[in-house]
Amino acid sequence: MFVNPAPTQAELTAFYQDPAYYKGGGLGYNDYFAQRESHETLADQRLKRIEKLLPAPGTVLDVGCAAGFFLAVAQKRGWTVAGVELSEDMAQYARDLTGQPIVPRVTELNVAPETFDAITFWEYIEHIPDPQDEVRRLTTLLKPGGVLALSTPNSSYWGAVYKPEIWREFKPPAHIGFFTAATLTRMLTACGLEVVALPRVFPLAPIHPYAARRLLDLLRRTLGNGAERRTPLWWVFSLAWRIVEKSTQMLYKWRWPDADIEVCIEAYARKPLA
């Protein structure tokens, strides 16, 4: 499902060059940099999933890399990184953070085919007018056996279906393409990829997912780091959070068995060896 007519490339470029997009203006982020810890924690989780599908960290390209938080976390985990980012302000921040060149478009990457072990685009495909063409182009840059990983809002989420007027992800021109797990799988398969995992993000009702993420960031700073289990208190809280989340998920499935309660889709796909 796509917005029609789609914005022109010139309109999209002007939209994302506006610094207000990342600082609480219009249809963008409330404050991208204030959410840095949350972005880094999520990046670490996603990289662990990718690393389970590969022999070892290698080269990774992040398309729509914004300020480079994902790339910086990848570097710490032993990856060689490259990035694509249309916003010049964010691209410069990513260059300073990672020490690597960041280009504005995929077509400006000066690399040979089959260069990357992994290619990622987190919350990116909903922003572009022809995502299938972009995925096909990126697949040529992926090594055989390499992993392509992405995330996007779930347009079959019950809030999008039953309360579309308040669904925060429908916000053209920022978001112009919308996917379900089924349509995303079809697109990746059509591009010659094998989908190996489709985890979806469940928001802990009644807490809004973005509010829940901010709450977790606050608790991590107070109680310790969730990934490294630095304090016993954080471990106890983390266990309790998972129990409550699973219980709430089971309640939703029992009460509304046909409702799709995952707010976001992540996809991990592999390029065939031959």
Image (tube, rainbow, N blue to C red):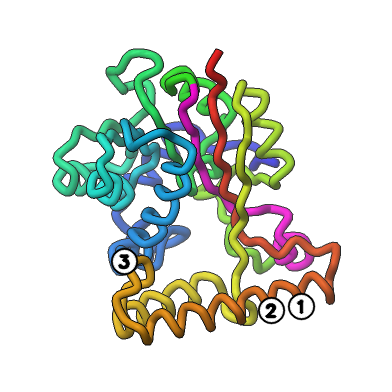
Which residue is found at the position 83% from the left and 71% from the top?
256
Residue 180 position, x and y percent, is 70, 47
Q: Is residue 162 magenta?
A: yes
Which residue is found at the position 33% from the left and 37% from the top?
57
Looking at marks 3 and 1 on the same chain, the residue that comes earlier in the sequence is marked by 3
Disc ID at residue 251? 1
Q: Is label 3 in contact with label 1 (beta carbons under 8 Å)?
A: no
Quarter occupied by residue 159: bottom right
Which residue is found at the position 66% from the left and 39% from the top?
184
Q: How much space separates mark 3 and mark 1, taking CA atoms?
A: 30 Å
Residue 134 position, x and y percent, is 51, 27
Q: Secondary structure at mark 2?
A: helix
Q: Secondary structure at mark 1?
A: helix
Residue 240 position, x and y percent, is 53, 83
Count residues near mark 2 (Cα–Cα under 10 Å), then give few for <14, some for 14-19, many for 20+: few
Q: Quadrant of the N terminus?
A: top right
> Mark 2 = which residue?
247
- What amino acid type should be assigned to the residue bearing mark 2? Ser
Q: How much space separates mark 3 and mark 2, taking CA atoms?
A: 27 Å
Q: Is residue 26 above or below residue 97?
A: below
Q: Is residue 242 above or below residue 133?
A: below
Q: Is label 2 in contact with label 1 (beta carbons under 8 Å)?
A: yes
Q: Is residue 194 magenta?
A: no
Nearer to us in this view, 188 or 165: 188
Which residue is found at the position 68% from the left and 36% from the top?
185
Q: Quadrant of the C terminus?
A: top right
Q: Secondary structure at mark 3?
A: helix
Discs 3/2, front: 2
Residues rendered magenta in the picture = 145-164
Disc ID at residue 37? 3
The answer to whether residue 100 is visible is yes
